[in-house]
Image (cartoon, helix red, strand yellow):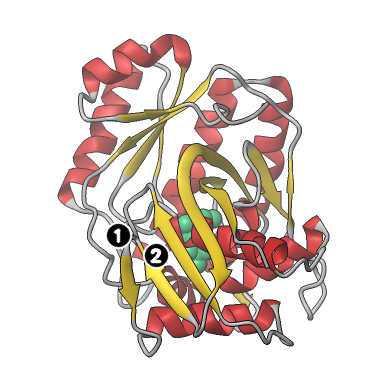
Amino acid sequence: MPPVEVFAPANIALAKYWGKRNRALNLPTNSSLSISLGSLGTTTRIAEAEKDTLLFNGKPLDNAAPEAQKIWRFVALCCPHRQQSITITTSNSIPTAAGLASSASGFAALTLALNEFFNLQLSDNALSTLARQGSGSACRSLWHGFVEWQKGEREDGSDSYATPIASHWQALRIALIEIETQAKKTSSRDGMNHTATTSPLFAAWVAQAEKDVHSIKRSIAAEDFMALGQTAEANAMMMHATMLAARPPLSYFLPESLATLQRIWHCREQGLAIFATMDAGPNVKILYQVQDEAAVIAAFPHAHCINPFSRCS
Ligand code: PMV
């Protein structure tokens, strides 16, 4: 079998996934909607080998390591009748496990690579459903641009997959403010399970998150940046507030995260149209429009600016 190489972008949710209704299948309590990060993501190569081997960011990963076992379990899920041993080589252009969604692009790239290498000929829905089982948000990383993940209703998860939203919003930009790149202490899996089981705000979060998906879809259709930014920022803050109300409380914020948020809010009061979002980590992402790029860089000199539609044809 000839070797294959695929790329999947990282994604940032504008309306977040936080809470599972089924932990084994990664079925969410609410729908979510993301924007992919253009050329930031994971490149994965699969080739024939004498024995199963993993190379992760240039380094061999012991098959007994928990991360490796997760990957081989996922390979077995995608290819239950596999006989050929393989080498999986994967490299990230984003820091791993720092709340910049590298597990999403990692499992999405692996799903695409397995489909291609073993000629599985899976439909987009089937690919997304599989990627979801590696990491929930991975089901959205199969596409560039805006992607919606419908939570679905069925118990087997067969209607819980993502689909791309037709939009090429050329002016939209994202700036990454890297505050810490080390692996987080609480995984998103543990964090969301703890929030869902102990936070008295959780039911309100689920109801609002579903409304936010609809509101963001309307903003995308109208290319209404202010409406998009306001909803995305409020959604992220509500997710973190719901975690903070968990017992004991859970917070991914570092002091520098809060200082960055306050700088964003101050800039906005001064008339700069920028909005924040944050995932399960201390890093902050800024949503802005291309015409404000110079002002964003002036206010946040270390910002890493991304055109999310750079790889869309
Ligand atoms: O897919 P997971 O298990 O890495 O969880 C992702 C959780 C958030 O990034 C905080 C939200 C999201 O929708 O991506």
Position of residue 218 relative to residue 46, above or below, is above
Res 29 visible: no
Q: Which image quadrant is residue 2 in?
A: bottom right
Tell which circle, 1 or 2, labels the residue nearer the N-terminal end: 2
**In x, y percent, where is residue 229?**
51, 30
Residue at figure coordinates x 73%, y 63% from the top left: 127
Residue at figure coordinates x 33%, y 42% from the top left: 284
Q: Which image quadrant is residue 177 in?
A: top left
Category of crowding for the residue at label 2, using alpha-carbon neighbours closer than 10 angstroms: few (below 14), some (14–19), many (at least 20)? many
Q: In this rendering, which labeled residue sits more in front, label 1 or label 2?
A: 1
Location of the N terminus by quadrant is: bottom right
Three-letter code, disc 1: Tyr
Tell how many labels.
Answer: 2
Residue at figure coordinates x 68%, y 29% from the top left: 220
Relative to 64, 256 lies left or right: left
**290 or 18, which is in the foreground?**
290
Residue at figure coordinates x 51%, y 31% from the top left: 230
Relative to 60, 13 lies left or right: right
Category of crowding for the residue at label 1, using alpha-carbon neighbours closer than 10 angstroms: few (below 14), some (14–19), many (at least 20)? some
* Residue positioned most to the bottom: 64
Marks 1/2 in contact by CB < 8 Å: the verdict is: yes
**74 or 11, which is in the foreground?**
74
Q: Which image quadrant is residue 223 in?
A: top right
Q: Which mark is residue 312?
A: none
- Which residue matches tag 2? 243
- Which residue matches tag 1? 252
| Label 1 C-beta lies within 8 Å of the nearest ligand 1 atom | no
Position of residue 101 relative to residue 243, above or below, is above
Three-letter code, disc 2: Met
Relative to 209, 276 lies left or right: left
Gap in angstroms between the C-alphas marked 1 and 2: 9 Å
* Residue positioned most to the left: 255
